Amino acid sequence: MPDATALGADLYEMYRVGRKVLPDAAVQYSVANRALDATQDGTSALFLQPTCFNGDIYSPVFPAWRELRDELQRVLAETQTNLELTGDVLCVAADAYARTDEAAARALQEAKNLKGDWPPVHVPAPIYPPARTGQGG
């Protein structure tokens, strides 16, 4: 039979990572996502060109840039969501195991009392780029 104190410490680490570490990382991805989202309207002006070059108001590079920017934003949003969900699952797993083992539950609660517990981290909702149909800005 595993040592309940050691198991409680392991459950505490699972709980800490799920409640604090992964949500904090998700917030960082949210910050990057929101910064990238803020470039959506501002960067299109960088790709304006006189229509005499090809009849289009935007440089031919613009659609490729926008596609790259949108894909990066999707990756940031999905990573943020995955980190947050993984954190939730770790906390659920730690709590579920503690409910099945009274000694481990006591050790987990003692670790929370001794080392601290954390309020939930607010992770803003992820922002995804808009669906695009045309090539313009």
Image: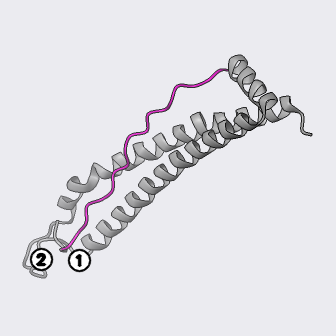
Q: Amino acid at mark 2?
A: Asp
Please name the predominant secondary structure of the magenta segment in the image.
loop
Coloring basis for residues: one colour
Look at 69% across and 17% down and name the residue there: 113
Look at 25% across and 61% down and name the residue there: 130
The percent coordinates of residue 50 (x first, y second) are 9, 72
Q: Secondary structure at mark 2?
A: loop
Q: Which residues are the magenta region?
A: 116-133
Look at 14% across and 70% down and name the residue there: 49
Q: Quadrant of residue 62?
A: bottom left
Is 124 placed left or right of 130 in the picture?
Answer: right
The percent coordinates of residue 35 (x first, y second) are 34, 46
Q: Is residue 1 magenta?
A: no
Is 50 placed left or right of 69 in the picture?
Answer: left
What is the CA distance from the residue labelled 2 to the residue labelled 1?
Answer: 8 Å
Front-most of residues 52 and 122: 122
Q: Secondary structure at mark 1?
A: loop
Neighbours of disc 1 within 10 Å: few (<14), some (14-19), many (20+): some
Front-most of residues 78 and 39: 78
Residue furthest top as drawn: 114
46 shown above or below 57: above
- The residue indicated by pointer 1 is 60
**Cβ atoms under marks 2 and 1 closer than 8 Å:** yes
Q: Which mark is residue 56?
A: 2
Q: Quadrant of residue 40?
A: bottom left
